[in-house]
Every structure is written in C-alpha cells, then in structure tokens.
Amino acid sequence: MLVKLIHVLLVVMILNTASAQIEYDASIPVYRNGNALELAWAGGLNHVQISDFDFDFDGDLDLFIFDITANNIRVLVQEDDNGTPYYDLLYNAKSLFPTDVVYRGIMVDYDNDGRKDLWTYGLGGLKVYRNVGDQVNGLQWQLQEDLIFTLYATGANSPLLVSQSDMPAIVDVDFDGDIDILTFHTGGEVVEYHQNQSMELYGIPDSLVFEQKNECWGLFREASTNNTITLNDPWMPCVGGSIPNPLRYGDTTRTAQLVGKMHAGSSLLAIDLDNSGVLDLILGDAFHSGLVSLINGGTAPNTNSAMTSQDVTFPSYDIPLELDLFPVSFYVDVDFDGIKDLVVGSNVNNLAENESSIHLYKNMGSNALPSFSFQQENLFQGDMIEHGSGSIPVLFDENEDGLKDLLLGNFLRYKPYLENESTIAVYRNTGTATNPEFTFIDFDYLNLSQETFGLRLAPTFGDLDGDGDEDLLMGRTNGQLNYYENTSTGNGAVFGVAQQAFQDAQGNVIDVGEYSFPQLFDINKDSLIDLVIGNRTGEIYYYENVGSTAAPSFQIVDSTFGQVDVSGSEVTGYASPHFFRRNDTTFLLCGTYEGTLHYFDNIDDNLLNTDSFNLVTDFYGQIDVEGYSTVVVEDIDDNQQLNIFVGQGLGGLYHFNETSSNNIGLNELSSNVSIAIYPNPAKDEITVSAGGEIISSVNIMDVSEKHVLTMQVQSESITIPVSALTSGAYFVQVQLTNTTKVERFLKR
C-alpha cells in the first residue's frame, strides 16, 4: 500500500532548551462502521462550494472546496495508488490563494488557457483572479478584475451586481468560447443574462467585457416569498423580451417592483439537462431545502427561448433533494470516471445542516445527457472525523482500559428545523499504548442532545472526589459549569445526572461570563487539581484548589490569569486553554476565535494575580484553522514526543506530531517563506520553488537525516532529478538568504 503523504508544513517550537518540530500527520487510523476513514484528519466540512482545477499542473483534476463557514479553503489533491485514484488533503492550502476570497469561491477558466481561474466576491458583485501558475512556479494568482462591470440595458456601464448570498452561473451560455454570467436580479425573481463580449470584440476569449443581453432569461419568474416558479411570466421585463435587449420602456410597472425587494438568496446551476443545445437551470432558494429544475424549450442559444417545464422536486425521477437549507449545486466529477456528477451543498451558515451537508448524485448518464442517482448525503464528510461546527477534542479513558480515548465536543450540530444542539462524540482507542487507533462509538455521549444546556459544551476530566476515577466538569454557554460524578466500578465511566451551577469555595456559582471552557490541571504543583476556565471575551480564570484530594474546593485567584487575552482585534476571543507540562515545566496553548493557537511559557513562577505569562507566539506552528481553534496535547503513542490534536470551526480535527530534530529548520519560527515541492509524490523529478525568494542550496536527506543529494542553486526554483533515489520519504532542506526551510516529499 502506497504511503499517503499529505503536504507537510514543518515548523519549529521551542520547549525548554530543546528544539523540536511539529508536522501535520494523518497516519493515526480512524474507523467507523468497520471502515477506515480515508480523510479522518482533514478537519471537517460544513457549507461548501466545490469545483475542480489542476492544482499541481500534473494533468489530472484536483478539487477546490470553499466553505462559507469562515471563508475556509480546502484542496483535495488527486493521487494515485497503483492505478487507483484517491483524494488527499493538501494541508494549509489557504496559504496558496489570495487572502480576500470571501462569500464565494469557484474555479472557471475564463480565458481558455487550460488553467482555471478563481472567481470570488467583489464589492456587490464579482472579482476574478487569473491563474498564471505553471508546473515550475506552482500556483500563482494575478488580480484580473477587482470588480466586473457590465453595460446594462439602461446604457450605464456599472458593476455587475450579484448579491453576496447568491451563487450565479458562470458559464458559456451561448457556446461561443467565452464565459458569460447568469444571475438573479438583485431584487430576485428574474434571471439576467450578461453576455461576455470578448469573442464579439476581439475574436478570442481572453477578456471580461460584459453586456446585459436579457433581463428575464428563460422568461420565468420566481416568487418573492417562496420558490414557486411562473413559466412564461406575463409581466415586465419578461414580456416582449428579445436579444439584444428585451426591456420595454413603455411599461415599467413590474420592473419597478423589483427594485428594493429583499432578496434572501438563490443559487443557479446552468447545464444542458436534455442534450438540446441550450442550457437548462437547477435552482436553489435560501428558504427551501429542495431543488427546482427548469427545462429550456429552445433549440439554439441567444433566441430568448422560454423555460417550458419544471421539476419542483428535482430529481423527481430518483430521490429528490432534501437538504436544510439553501441548496447550491455544482456539476463536477468527484469519482474519477470522467463524467460530471451533481454535488449539492448548503449555502448558509449556522442555520443549515452542517454534518451531512454535501449530497452526491452520481451521473449515471453522460456529460451530454446526465441522469442523476442519489449516492450519499455526506460526501467527503463521511470519510472524516466530522461532528458539526466548532470541534473540541479531549482525551479521556472512557472505558478504563488504560488507553486514552478521543472525545469530541462541538459548538453546534444542526437540528431540524432551524434549531441547533451541542453533543459529544466518542472515538474509542482500539489500538495499543504505542500504536493508537480510534473507532467511532457514539455521537451523543451522555445524551446531551436531549438537554437544554446550550451550545459549545466543553468537557474536562479529573478526579474530583479522590476515588481514583475521573469526573467530568462541562463548560456551558451561560458561563457556568456542570458537574458529573463518575461512579465507575472499574469497567468504564458511569456518569450520573448533571449537577448544575457548580460552586466555588465560598459557595458562589462559578460564572465566567459566557462560553466557559474549563480545564482541570494542577497549576501550582501541590498535587491538588486546580481549575482554569477560558471565556468568550478571551481571558482565563484561575481557581486554586484549597481543599483536598477527596474534597476539592476552588477559590478564585485571578480573572485575568497570566494577563492572557486572546481576543486580539476581535471583540470576542473564545479562549480555549490547554496547560501541559514537560520536564516539570508548564506551558500553555490557547485556542482562539480567529483560529490560531497562542503559545505561552514562563508560567510556573507567575501564578499571582498581577503576574504575566510570556507570549512566545500567537501563531504557534503556523497553525491556522480559520476559526474556533481548540487544542489538546498528549503523548498518545508513548514515544516521548507530543501529539497535538486541534479542533476547528468546520467540526473536524487536525493531528500534528512532534518530531525531534538536531539540525533541521532551526530558524523557521521567524520565517513566513513558503516552499513548494511538486509533484509530490514524485517518480522522476521534483521542482522546488521558494515563491520569489532566492534559493542558495538544496539538501535532500533520508528520514535518518543522512544527506543523499546536495545542489547549489542561486535561483527562485530548481528542478531536481530523483529517479535514482529509492522509494520512501525524504526531507528537502532549502537554504534561503536569511533562513532555512524544510519540507518532505515521497519518492515513488
């Protein structure tokens, strides 16, 4: 079996005087229902927009996934295992794209150069980045249009308006080779056709010059309050419509009614469903869970043809879509058969399904005449650790077999209809002390979905009654804590009914404001377990245990412990503290609302309420999960190196592994230079690129750090033959002007 090597980012962290690296590691097996999760540690997905492109310029199509939850970007790279294709996560893919991709992100090749370009939100409309990358330099982006303009029927050359909540159809409507745009009027109800004039003006499809050619394309109207479709609508601007401009200035009554209407959101997918030579539509609506398809009755494009039939429960010939809420459709091959499938996500955050929210309809027909058959409701999500939004990892020996199990809380899981709940999932460690593996057991531990404790239930475990087993404290939305006593007899944890409003030594209810995030940890090394609690505003409370092992009693010491405040530029911080100890020295990693990890040292001698911890970095390991980071640290495989599990807004997990190092990457902490190596895995050669920096030398080392190849460079990139190397993993040490960077690649 080919070892799957996911793009690795090696970074340095300093603990005491020893140097170490952490790397993204997807090697710990995870199982559900007897099946290995192929993308277990890929971090989760919620509300996606999906398209394909050739990320690594190797001739096959990879997947670009934009998630509107926090404008997340994920790339699934197509790899090959002895002739069997599969997808692997490209870790930290967002660093390879422009920083202002928001609300929408899809790949469409507008200039017909074979490289798909990036379309995203511009102020009130559309922005386009041209893909100017290649195999030597990797992905490169050039801002082509900060805001697309169009010549409207009124004669004004103005921004082409597309609501930020809408998904337009960016497609060659008239099949002339350039890319046109279909979008709902900003007031909703009717679809506008903006024709690209590149072919008409220049004879080549290399420009983004648009003209509004139809104000009611398809001659239908969607109701303003629901998704009811009226075919052959008799009102303006649908009546009398014709190319080049169907607007009739003699009757503006109905047109005026569109202006100022509240348009919640619509999605358009334009494909030829019946092989008629004109585009049909698949519509989604912000307040509905199904799709509507419209069949175009025309036989040639640009003839102002009307939609003549509709399927209001598309696809009614199979299993109609039912996805809360605001379905958005994409036509893309996701199963490597060369035939485009129908993939449907949800296009609204927090008020929509977020755990099984990517529905796959396999195309059983052809690209010319598609026929869709429902396959699954959790495409890619079903291969991940994925439990809604805002995952919270905790390690706890739930079945008391001596191995730490993985428990995963969340901020919320969607609960029909338009409700949410918070739950805790259990993944039991079914491996060994040195080779962990996790098997899914339960998504609703303690039946928390039946309670009314609010969202973001944050668990922590510790022996609070001196009976040798670990009890549970759980943070709540209201800033308070629930206590659950563990009454185990040695065959697994047994928790009783929650004791709410947990109190301190003075009998006061412990309350840290909102969204309490507790950790039980012996802060002051007196062999009594203490209590620290993060909160929504970004601070940490410290309660010292002034009781005993059998009868703990927590007394407030500081409400701004260590002067920690992770709110940064935000008004909220969602401090998620995790203290840990190494060589008898205490450190703190703290999750944040922004999605990075703050790393603190100098803790042990600064426990008074006026003391401050030392913030080593607010970007630990260059880890950025793009929202709601949480973290737990443990040597789960007993190799004297730390395993780091990072929760995130998309509901899944990243796993990082600490690897000791003598010489590699000692200057990386202060460097933001990104090194690209491709193809990876490689058979004959690799290209190393430093993104504009000058490379002075490249050293290739095997896993024992033995140098096997050294090259002097003095350029921004270099192609290196590797066919003579034996198969396996290698380090690539890249010497730049002011720093040294390290990446890995896999030799096939």
Image: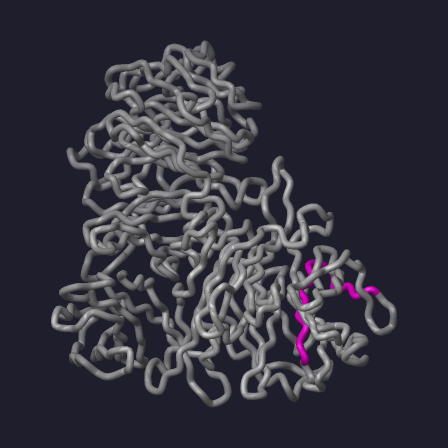
Q: Nearer the viewer, residue 109 or 705?
A: 705
Task: Identify the image quadrant of the N terminus.
Answer: bottom left
Which residue is at a point 40% across and 82% down the rendered structure image?
660
Judge whether residue 159 can be spotted in this image: no
Q: Is residue 390 above or below residue 538?
A: above
From the viewer's perspective, is 40 left or right of 332? right
Q: Position of residue 475 (x, y in %)?
A: 70, 61
Q: Nearer the viewer, residue 213 or 626?
A: 626
Dominant secondary structure (helix, strand or loop) of the stretch shown in magenta: loop
Q: Nearer the viewer, residue 593 or 490?
A: 490
Task: Identify the image quadrant of the C terminus.
Answer: bottom left
Which residue is at a point 47% across and 70% down the rendered structure image?
432
> Any magenta on residue 598?
no
Q: Which residues are magenta?
A: 509-522
> In which image quadrant can residue 565 be found?
bottom right
Q: Is residue 5 above or below residue 68?
A: below
Q: Is residue 601 above or below residue 317?
A: below
> In which image quadrant can residue 274 be found?
top left
Which residue is at a point 39% across and 61% down the rendered structure image?
92
Judge whether residue 466 can be spotted in this image: yes
> Any magenta on residue 518?
yes
Q: Position of residue 77 (x, y in %)?
A: 30, 54
Q: Position of residue 298 (x, y in %)?
A: 29, 15
